[in-house]
Every structure is written in C-alpha cells, then in structure tokens.
Image: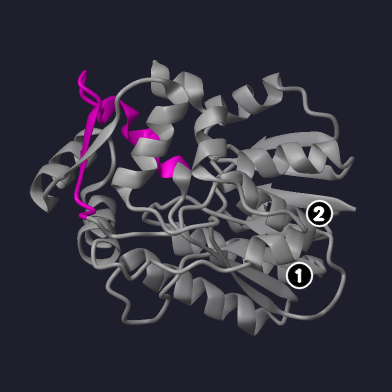
Amino acid sequence: MKVLVTGASGSVGAPLVRRLSEQDVMTRAVVRRPESAAALEEQRLPGVEVASTDLANEAAARHLLDGIDAVFLLTANAGNQLAQEQSVIRAATEAGVRRVVKLSVGGVSPDAPLALARVHYAAEQNLAASGLPRTVLRPAFFMDNLLQFIGWIEPSGRLELPLGDGAMPMIDARDIADVAAVELHDSSTHDRELVLTGPEDLTMTQALGRIAEVVGRPLSYVDGNRTDFLRRYVADGNSPEYAEDIATLYDAILRAGYGAGTTDGVRKVTGQAPRTITDFAQAHRAAFTG
C-alpha cells in the first residue's frame, strides 16, 4: 500500500505522515514550499518520500499519483485552492485509487457565508462526481489554531480574540490524523462523512484556563472585536480575503455558539477517546511557556 498525503507539513498532515510511517505504510508526502520539504526530509521518517510542488499543475499531480493506492486531500487556503483539489481529484480518478480521504469543513454549501466553505463544497461536488470511494472529514475548531496566536499573548497572559463566550468542541489535530490513517486503510467502496470533535464543549476562557494549569503561567481570555482582529491577522501575513473569512467564523459563527456539540466520531473510528485540551497543553507546553 502506498499513500499520498497532501498538506504534509500542516497541523493534520504532519502527524498523519508520522503515523503512517510508524505503521510501515509507504507514503508520498507533498508540500508547497521547498523549505517545508527540506524540514520534512530532515526527520528521516522511514518509508516517507517527500515532494514539493504546485498541486494545481495537472502534469505534476498525475506524476504524484503514480503508484498511489489512497489519497489524503488537504490543500492550502490559497486563491487556487479549488484548482489544486480538482487537479488532485482528476489525477486520482485517472490513477484509479481506491479511496480519497478529504479534509473539509462544516456548513459547506454553494451560498455559505464563508468563502472557505463554498470552496470545499465545490471540491466535494467534484469528488462525488468522480465516483471514487471517499471519506469526508468535518472537524471542529482545532486546538492547534491557538498556536498561531501565541505571539499575541501579552506579558500578563491576556489573549484577545473575537469569540465571546461561544463554546466549541475543540479537537486536537492528532485525533484528525488518527482518524484519517484508519480511513486510508479502508478498502471498501462505501462513502462516509465524519463529523469529528473533541470530548467537550469549551469556551476560550475555559480552554486557556486549562492550558494555564498545565504550563504554569497565567493565561486569560479577553473578548476582542473584528476590526482589531483583522488588522493583526493580516499583519501576521494572512491575506485580507482569508482574514475576512476567519473573522466571520470567529465573530459571527463561533461567537453565536453554532460550533457547539460533540460527537463520538473519533472513538468510533479509532477506538480511542479524543484528546483533551489538557493533553494538547502537555504536548505543546514549550510553545506556551516560551
């Protein structure tokens, strides 16, 4: 068995590649940037072959699919995201892979309020039309998203984000990777859609409080506003279009509690309970302590 993992340096792709290597699964790990490829190669993971390419390139995608049995499809939130996914789906169809596991989002529709959800909807339609057996993963808010805001934490431990007291069943990206690894091994022709969550709904105040208990430093949540968030998020290098999407997700959708509600998806697939926010904090203690 040989698996193609796109987005192999990301919060889900990286642990998935490690898990497949541990399982002695031959893996072709694909990243966008040469520096990401170099960092992945330095890990010298057994059975892992690293490639850096633009997935929107049809010829490159076909080459990557040579000899591949299953595909984990995750592409960057970029202007050509849909083109990348369509390119991989076409190449996978030509190669006759036995399963595509696609990381998606909740609330997909052609008229969704988030551009990201509209893009994923279009890609899912393409995947369904291909006839390839597929698993679509719809995870909740990643605990790992908090890592990108560590630089925003003030010396006093205050972190300002526009989430209000909206509760959400935050999930550790490692649990998503574990589910993906199981699904990639599936040789059935059944299609599945899995909503994946952590074990409990947490507000940002509760999440930071749990992390603070582990890392031994004060951490507290401060409700912010959309305008300040947009300014800082763009200053961090995100595109204005993507920043608008994330601001809407935080300030309108998650703030209103639309992301709440747990599922048993992780346990059903992996046989293990999903990791807690305490587990996440222990794994990333160094990042939070500086």
Is label 2 in a helix, a strand or a loop?
Answer: loop
| Residues shaded magenta | 144-164
Q: Is residue 7 at all visible to an observer of this figure?
A: no
* Left or right, 288 with reference to 179: left
Residue most extreme to the front: 213
Amino acid under disc 2: Asp
* Left or right, 170 with reference to 196: left
Task: Point out which mark residue 94 bears.
Answer: 1
Amino acid under disc 1: Glu
> Does residue 153 belong to the magenta stretch?
yes
Q: Do callouts 1 and 2 mark residues in contact (Cβ within 8 Å)?
A: no
Q: Position of residue 96 (x, y in %)?
A: 81, 70
Mark 2 burial class by Cα count in 10 Å: few <14, some 14-19, many 20+: some
Image position of 267 with respect to 227: above or below: below
Point out the tag, 1 or 2, that comes first from the N-terminus. Answer: 2
Distance of mark 1 from mark 2, alpha carbons? 10 Å
> Does residue 45 belong to the magenta stretch?
no
Q: Position of residue 40 (x, y in %)?
A: 65, 28
- The residue that disc 2 covers is 66
Mark 1 burial class by Cα count in 10 Å: few <14, some 14-19, many 20+: few
* Left or right, 112 with reference to 171: left
Image position of 290 with respect to 227: above or below: above
**Which residue is nearer to you in this view: 174 or 285?**
285
Q: Position of residue 101 (x, y in %)?
A: 68, 64
Q: Residue at x 71, y 22 (%)?
A: 43
- Where is residue 269, by image quadrant? bottom right
- Where is residue 167, by image quadrant? bottom left
Image position of 152 with respect to 254: above or below: above
Q: Residue at x 73, y 71 (%)?
A: 93
